[in-house]
Structure formats: structure tokens, C-alpha cells
Amino acid sequence: MSARRALDLSLYLVTDAALCGERGVAATVEAAVSGGATIVQLRDKHASDEELLALLARLDEAIAGRVPLVVNDRLELVLRARAAGLRVDGVHLGQGDAAVLRARAELGPDAIVGLTANTPAHLAAVAALPAGTVDYLGVGVLRPTSTKPDHPPALGIAGFAALQAAARDAAGAPVPCVAIGGVRLEDAAPLRAVGAAGLAVVSAICAAPDPRRQAADFAAAWRGGATPRTAHEPRIPRVLSIAGSDPSGGAGIQADLKSIAAVGGYGMAAITALTAQNTRGVRSVHVPPAASLLAQLDALSDDLIVDAVKLGMLANAELIRTVAEWLGRVRPPLVVLDPVMVSTSGDRLLDPEAEAALRELLPLADLVTPNLAELAVLAGADGPAADWASALEQATALSARTGVLVLAKGGHLGGAEAPDALVDARAGAALAEIVEFHGERIATRATHGTGCSLSSAIATLRARHGAWEPAVAEARRWLRESLRHGASLEVGGGNGPVHHFAGLWTRGGLDTAPTPAELGAEWWADIAELRRAIDELPFIRRLADGSLPRTAFDEYLAQDAHYLREYARALAEAARLAPDASAQAFWAAGSRECLTGELARHERDLAGALGAATGGAAAEFEPNAVNLGYLDHLLASGARGGYPELVAAVLPCYWIYDDLGRRLLAGDFGPEPGSPEHPYADWLAMYAEPSFAVSTQRAIELVTGVAAAATPEVRERMHRAFRRSAEFELAFFAAPLAASADDAPAPPGCGTRALSATIGA
Ligand SMILES: Cc1ncc(COP(=O)(O)OP(=O)(O)O)c(N)n1
Ligand SMILES: Cc1nc(C(=O)O)sc1CCOP(=O)(O)O
Ligand SMILES: [Mg+2]
């Protein structure tokens, strides 16, 4: 069989010798293919032909026929290798490389020929290519990446989806597109939902400490659901704290190790400084020589894998440079920097030379977690933010300037609330993405070491979850419980430590029994990237500005009408299974409203043109694969998991529509969506109706109430059902503007595999 025929592009590994480091390219490829990479591209801009030929022979052994192997750029070399009997399945060419027509002619019909396309003009050129010239397109960059310094502008999920929609050859056949450039684990679900053929990844796998595991995580994330957290074999992240010692045990490495352990990681510590302190204050600091720190760090990286690093007190410029050099050499996959620079009382803890060195180190971090005083210093502001809006502004400026994610922390602001926010302005300040986390302030003096503890917990949970928002949400939930119980430790006469193990000791498990509100916040944060991807969809943007073609809207209505008819049955089933009369009445009313409200309006709007979709006699309407997959998921959730999973699965349809409807009508997506001339004004108003908000709130309370009272296992299954539905929501919104019904995005679990799973359940 030719390598082309069954081309699986879902996890496309592109090699980089420098990033593979001492492990080497062949060992990295062997591990990544064992983990689930489905195609490999040898990309090396510097190696000679002879070196590449030798490497190709080693890669052939490493791959052992399991997946195809292509070479980047070098068509002549591919021809030479094939003539010499080496196995090379094809070539990937960029716009400036050899012509794909020539590659196809010289390599023959069975070879794989890939092409880079980053702009509409590139796609226009693809549209002139005879059918079968190229097998796939590499479309990027998804996000800015240092792996290809000369990369084109970042597209984001929506930009990728828009280019992909135009990817057709001269015969009008769609050309599969893989997303490349800065692709991360959390991009898998949204990319798959918008119909990508796969993820092309360089650094995330080549530079990973364990490429097999990393590839397995990508493959699982692509399949859907089985992210590291929910996999059967949950990863225990190995987390290194590089920080100072606090002998009182509430802050520094002592707090870091406790925090890492409390949230499920294996903690390690390299000590930068020995402080003499207690809960009342710091008396002295002894900083051992930099060579001693370097020896600690090298001893670790020579032997074991570090999944995440948390940086705390780095004491002086020499130590900071030592850490920066080690980070640059070892490249741990995750670095969280808690920049211990300014004390809560406002004292500068680093001298000017050390502050300058820390600024230089900053871009080596993935996330920085400054307190308000440190944020002001790092952002170059006149003074600490006096309110939350100013804190977010400073965090946005810092993230934009350094290319690092910032956790803005409102704990020192005073007031009834203690908000935090993840601020991502890495693609430029104008495009800042801000995810806020709210919660009432906890009145306690037990706040010693909260910054150290939070940053260590986030580093650990980010390594477990593969995404920032759920990591921050869970770390906050854990810290809040630890704060609530801190006083019970009765440690010291000043500001005592938090109770890192409050959840573990009071309930005998890692589960900290969240409140319904905390769970709601965590689940909502967990789908933040899906919600953002929905926001960016051309369908939503054009719905908001009124430019959505009526045909696409009608297609959407027809699909939604079919969906609502069955969704009403799912709500009726929830009513049947409900544990009490109040919940029963709520779901029954929801089912009725679905049929008499939304569905009736859809039918009116469709005005009979798509009568088949809504139960009419004509048989033209076909529910698309996303629709069938989504409904199948609802059915399966109820059949397998009863009331808890069923209600978790129906919740995103309330919550996402309510949120989207209100923001659309409020003008968050552009001017005047509420004006009567807007072609979709009625429809937009329906989801922004106050009664829908009330129902949504009640649905959230009911579902999170069940989840909070459930066992951790049931709660986790509910969470998964909820997340899967959110993935279907994204795919549902993306489908109408996908090129044809056949291209309707297929999110995880969608289609025949899910159907048979249901039947088998
Ligand atoms: C799968 C995939 N997509 C895009 C590229 C980039 O190719 P090109 O534009 O030629 O840039 P270089 O990789 O040659 O720098 C790729 N290599 N693979
Ligand atoms: C090789 C390559 N081509 C790109 C393109 O957009 O054409 S971006 C890129 C590098 C992607 O590396 P990473 O996964 O480490 O971000
Ligand atoms: Mg090239």
C-alpha cells in the first residue's frame, strides 16, 4: 500500500536537532512514534546531504515502518535517498522551495507531497493545482513560536479555520490542513472541532523531557477527553522549586514542597538562600555561592526529568544568571516565576543589578505571578495598581512586552473580593485575553507564604492538566481551602502559614470537596479555550455584524431545530431521573420551553423552506455528523452515567448560549447587534432574554450542586461529559460555514465510533 493512501496527519512530528539535544533525533522520533505520532518530517536546515542520508537510515530503523517519513525542503535529497534504496515517503515544501508540481512529477503518485500555505494568496494558488498534486497543507503559525523565527503572523484558531475553509484544489476537492506553529495540548480540541486534519508539532515534543509521554498526551488530547488528568494512568508531575528556605515552614521551599505534594506532584528543591525568619518577619539571609546552586541543579538535570520548575527567591544577580543559564540549557517544559522582588510592606528585596538580571530571565518563564508591587516594578508603572482595572492594564503591558503569561493577583487590593486573572497579551497588547477568577475574600491572618504556595500549585497542576485555566482554577480552590483552615494550625504569633493539607487531612483524600460555586468556576474556566474559539469563529463574528449569509444561518437553524427536538427529549429524561420534585419540574419546564419556544421560533424563521428538518414531509434535510455526535453524546451520558452525567452534558447548551447571547446583544462583538435592522436581531434577543438567564442560573446550580455532593469519580465523569458537550458546541457553531456538509467538523467521539460505543454501553 502506498504511504499516501491512508494518510493519518493527526499528530505530525517535525524534527529539530537542536531541540532534541543530546537524546538525538532518532531516539526522539522512536519515542514520539511509540507515543502516537502518526507522521514524521525530518527538518534540518544545517545538515549536509551526507549527514541527512545517514540520519534517514537511522530514522528508518527508529520508525520501523510504523508511520510515514517525509523530508523538509530538500527534494533533490529525497530523490537521491530513494534512488539509493532508503525509505523516504515524500517531501514537505514551502512557498520558497521547489515547486510541488515538479515534486509530484518526480516522486510519482504514491509519494506524499505537502505544502505550506499561510495566506489567502497561497490558497488561491493551491486552488489552481490539479487534483492530487498535494496531499496536505501545513497552515500556520497558530501562535508565535521561537522555533521558526521568521514565521508569518499568528492566525489563532479562527484564522486557521478561515484559511482551511478555502483549502481546495482545482477540482474543488478539500485539501486536508494541519495546524503548525506554537501548537499546544490545549489547542487539540478546538482545532479538531474546526476540522483540522492534525497538529504539526516541533518543540512541544522534541524538547519534552519525555517525548513518548508528550506525544501520547497530544494523541489523547486529539482523540478527546483523555487529557493527562483524565487518563487512566494520571501523570504525577515532577516539580522543582528553586527558592529560598523558610525555617518556619510557611513560605519558600518548605511551602513549595508542601503545595506540590498537596495538589498531587512530586516535589524537589534546589536552595538559593537560607533565611532566618518566623511568622513575624525576616531576621537575616545567607546566600551560598552560585556554584553550590549550579551543582544542585546539574545533579538533578543529569539524572531525572523535571516536568515543571517554580522559581521563587533568587537572591542576587549571580544566582539569577546561574538559573537563567541552566534553564536555557535544560529547557524544562514549564517555568512559573514568582518574582520575589518586593515584600508586602513595600521593601525592595533585590538590588538594582539583580532586578535587571531578573528582567532578562523573565522571557524564559511561561507564567509570572507577581504581587501588585512586583507587577508595578516589572511593568515599569509609577506605583502599585490602586484598583483591579489598573492591575489588569499593568499585567497586559507586562505580558505584551515580555511574551510571558501573567497572573495578576488582586489579593492585596482590599475589598470584599479577591480576584485573580490570567492575562495573555503575548500576541500583542491589543489582543489581550483575560480570564478572571473571582471569589469572596477570606478573612484570616494565616497568609504567610500564599504567593509561594499558589505559584507552586499552579506549576504542578499545569503539568497535570496541560492547560493554564483549569490549573489556576484548581490551585485557587485548593489555596482558598488552605487559607480557611490556616488558623487551626496555631503556628507563630504573626501571620501564620496556610494549612497546605487541609483537604487531605479533613477528608482523607486529595479531593477537597469543592462548593458548587467553586466547581462552576472551575468547569467554566476549563472550557475557556473552547469558548474563546467559539468567539473567534467566522460564524459568530458574522452573525454579530449581520454579514452572515442567510443560507449559512438557515443551515444552522435547520441543524439546531433537529438538535432541539432531541435535546427536549434529553431534558425530559433528566426530569424522569431527577431526585426531587423541584429538579423534576425544572427540567420538564425546560423540555417544554425548548419545543414551544426556541424550536417554534426556528420553525417560523425557516418559514417552511427547510421543513424536513423540523418534522415536515420533505426529506432533504440531513443532520450533520456533529449534530448526530452531540445527540449521541447526550444519550450515552444518560445511559451510562444516569442523572448526574446527563445533566452535566445538557448544561453547556444553556450556559454557552446564555453567555454568548448576552455578550452578542451587549455589543461585545461589534456595533449595534441590537438594532432592528440587524437581520438576526430577533434571534440574538431570544438568547439574551432575562428568563433564559434565570433558567441558566438554575441549571448551573442544580448541576454543580449534584457534582459537589458526588464522589470524586462521579464528579470527574460529570466534568468530562460537560467538557465534551462544550466541544460539540464549538463544532456545532463551526459547521455551517465549513465548506460542505461532508466537511462538518468531527469533534472527539463523533460519528460511528461514538454510536457503536453507545450501543455497546
Ligand atoms: C507540516 C509543515 N508545515 C509547514 C512547514 C513549514 O515549511 P516552510 O514554509 O518551507 O518553512 P521551513 O520549515 O522550511 O522553515 C513545515 N516544515 N511542515
Ligand atoms: C517549521 C514551522 N513551520 C511553520 C509555518 O508556519 O510554516 S511554524 C514552524 C515551527 C513550529 O514549531 P513549534 O511547534 O515548536 O512552534
Ligand atoms: Mg521550506
Image (cartoon, rainbow, N blue to C red):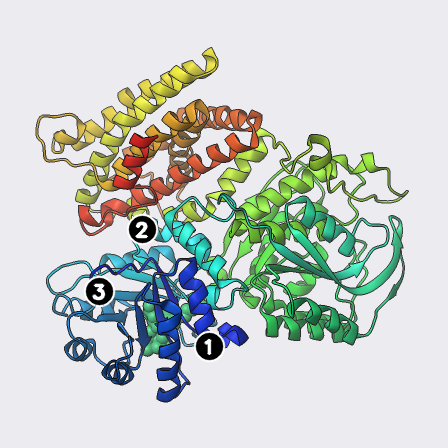
- Specify the quadrant that holds the C terminus: top left
Where 481 falls versus 316 (above or below)? above
Toward which corner of the image does residue 238 lie, by quadrant? bottom right
Q: What residue type is labelled 2?
A: Val
Q: What residue type is labelled 3?
A: Arg
Q: What element carries label 1?
A: helix
Q: Residue at x 37, y 88 (%)?
A: 50
Crowd tier of the residue under label 2, counting other residues whose Cα lies within 10 Å: few below 14, some 14–19, many 20 or above: many
| Among numbered discs 1 and 3, the one appearing first in the sequence | 3
| Among numbered discs 2 and 3, the one appearing first in the sequence | 3
- Specify the quadrant that holds the N terminus: bottom left
Say whether residue 167 is left or right of residue 524.
left
Disc 2 residue: CB within 8 Å of ligand 2: no
Q: Nearer the viewer, mark 2 or mark 3?
A: 3
The alpha-carbon separation of the residues under discs 1 and 2 comes to 32 Å
Toward which corner of the image does residue 290 lie, by quadrant? bottom right
Say whether residue 587 is left or right of residue 344.
left
Say whether residue 219 is left or right of residue 716.
left
Q: What residue type is labelled 1?
A: Ala
Q: Residue at x 31, y 61 (%)?
A: 178
Q: Nearer the viewer, mark 1 or mark 2?
A: 1
**Residue 17 vs residue 130, the one in the foreground:** 17
Q: Is mark 3 on a helix, strand or loop?
A: loop
Residue named by callout 2: 194
Residue named by callout 1: 17
Q: What element carries label 2?
A: loop
Q: Residue at x 86, y 41 (%)?
A: 491
Q: Residue at x 23, y 39 (%)?
A: 556
Q: Find the residue positioned furthest to the top.
A: 581
